[in-house]
Image (tube, rainbow, N blue to C red):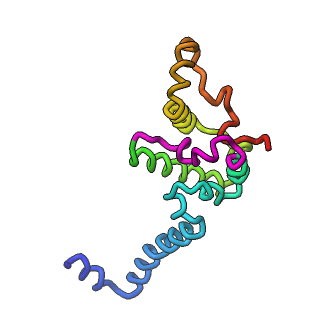
């Protein structure tokens, strides 16, 4: 209560500056979240990935892929170990994507970074465990990622 009283006892010009200093960032954040359809990124809807025009090619390629009927973007691109891990990776990717697409500084075509490549590899192995067990026995000396040979499975560009 004392804290609130000390704020309210300030001169009007200080109150206006305080309200602007707090209100502008909150307002801009809410506007940006709404404009960027931020709530959609909390879902598993693949259409959320196409909110940004840069990702439309990947979304359209996924629609033609063999995985369309069995996997959405988050099935391959986020960890399955826990909800915390899933949303941490989504948060990191969301921040990185926002920064890259806002500044225009990104690879074209888009490439997975080390973290995302590791998540995809882990999910490939987990979902296809029957096959990957046999492959691991035959290729134990090689460290090949599944996408080395199967790079268009999730995003088939052949129509």
User: What secondary structure is the magenta-colored segment mainly?
Assistant: loop
Q: Residue drawn at (56%, 68%), measured in percent from left and top?
A: 32
For the view shown, which residue lies furthest in the right direction? Answer: 159
Q: Residue at x 55, y 39 (%)?
A: 116
| Quadrant in the picture for the C terminus | top right
Q: Which residues are magenta?
A: 62-81
In the rendering, at what x and y percent does residue 104 appear?
69, 53
Q: Is residue 43 left or right of 56 when viewed as pictured?
A: left
Quarter of the image with the N terminus in it: bottom left
> Which residue appears at 45% of the width and 76% of the height?
23
The image shows residue 157 at horizontal and vertical percentages of: 76, 42
Image-quadrant location for residue 102: bottom right
Residue 42 image offset from top left, x and y in percent? 49, 58
Considering depth in this image, is 10 or 121 the residue closer to the camera?
A: 121
Q: Is residue 140 left or right of residue 23?
A: right
Q: Residue furthest left?
A: 2
């Amino acid at each position: 209560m004392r804290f609130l009283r000390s704020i309210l006892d300030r001169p009007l010009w200080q109150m206006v500056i305080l309200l602007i200093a707090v209100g502008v960032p909150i307002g801009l954040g809410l506007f940006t979240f709404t404009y960027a359809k931020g709530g959609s990124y909390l879902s598993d809807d693949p259409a959320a990935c196409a909110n940004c025009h840069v990702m439309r090619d990947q979304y359209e390629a996924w629609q033609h892929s063999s995985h369309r009927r069995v996997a959405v973007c988050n099935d391959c691109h986020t960890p399955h170990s826990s909800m915390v891990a899933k949303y941490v990776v989504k948060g990191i990717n969301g921040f990185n994507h926002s920064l890259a697409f806002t500044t225009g500084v990104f690879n074209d075509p888009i490439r997975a970074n080390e973290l995302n490549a590791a998540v995809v590899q882990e999910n490939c192995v987990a979902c296809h465990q029957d096959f990957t067990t046999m492959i691991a026995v035959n290729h134990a000396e090689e460290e090949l990622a599944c996408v080395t040979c199967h790079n268009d499975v999730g995003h088939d560009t052949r129509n």
